[in-house]
Image (cartoon, rainbow, N blue to C red):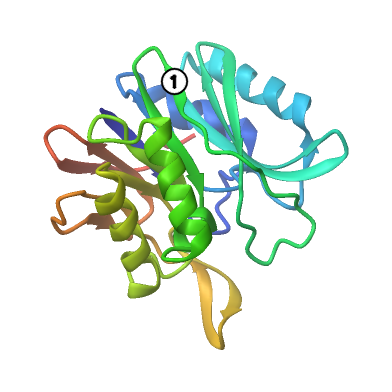
Amino acid sequence: MKIALVQLDANDRLWKSSEMAGLLRPLKDMDLVVFPECMPFDNSSSVEYAEAVSILEGVSRQSRAPAFMAGGYVLENEIMRNAVFLTFAGKTIDSYFKRIPWQEPDISPGGESKKFIWEKGSCVPLICADAADNPSPNGTRMMYEAIRCGACSDVPIVVASYGTWLLEDYWQDPLKLWSVGTGAPVVICGVSGVGDSVEDNGKLGNYGGGGSGVFWPDGQAPIQRKRRGIHIVDTVSRRMRSMPIPRP
């Protein structure tokens, strides 16, 4: 499977739905395109679930895009969710709600794992802390659920993230565990550049910093990139190539 990871800066001017078609048009030969967590619906622009679906379907029709994963903060029946949607051929096929919030007191977590299925493939989606919270009872249970959903060498786990430290042990260890434990490539799309300061367990850092790439179930060293750009993972050849973000 060829998966394009759109790694934008933390405060990128392209971080909005009106720019998505331009980002997607050069990627027509991809099997899947993945945007970071909360792209395009960040916490300053939460929308109703149905409106988010309509916007993403419009992007798909406008760009004639391949399947893509995007989402963010949406209201579902007056409940705030952190969601990722799978959209293909002008239709939103499925959605997944983040199950482990991280400094998100207003969102209601989801309760089930999903398998996204479309014409050119399938994957098991996760959102940020869903993958970082491992090993833990929650992480172990979710990893088992991912296997039951079909995660394997041919069905990657795909993570949309807004997190920092993707190149450090904080993230490296759980992502390796997810990959080895499920037998599936774990593909993660993160954020480049530097965003607002955050604190976790007394450690000060910043959102972003790069790290989009892939982790392999046989323990082979992951392939990751720091810079802003589109990073294309081929899960069959185990190669990754990069291209610049297209100009609007």
Disc 1 marks a residue whose amino acid type is Ile
Establish if 187 lies above or below 100.
Answer: above
What percent of the width, then of the height, locates residue 111?
64, 42
Q: Quadrant of the N terminus?
A: top left
Residue 17 versus residue 37 in the image, above or below: above
Q: Residues within 10 Å of mark 1 (few under 14, many from 20)?
A: some
**Above or below — where is 28 with respect to 48?**
above
| Camera sees residue 8 | no
Q: Position of residue 179 (x, y in %)?
A: 28, 50
In terms of depth relative to the viewer, which is nearer, 115 or 190? 115
Give the quadrant of residue 51.
Answer: top right
Q: Is residue 245 left or right of residue 81?
A: left
Q: Can residue 49 be seen?
A: yes
Q: Foreground residue, 162 or 100?
A: 100
- The percent coordinates of residue 148 (x first, y second) are 41, 34
**Depth order, front residue of 234/150:** 150
Which residue is at a point 48% across and 52% down the rendered structure image? 141
> Is residue 164 placed above or below 100 in the rendered structure?
below
The residue at the point 69 percent across, 49 percent down is 109
Name the residue tied to disc 1.
117
The structure residue drawn at horizontal position 50% and vertical position 32%, both measured from the top left corner, is 69
* Residue at x 38%, y 64% (from the top left corner): 166
The tally of labels here is 1
Q: Secondary structure at mark 1?
A: strand
**Residue 140 left/right relative to 102:** left
Residue sticking out furthest to the bottom: 202
Q: Percent position (x, y) of residue 217?
A: 21, 49
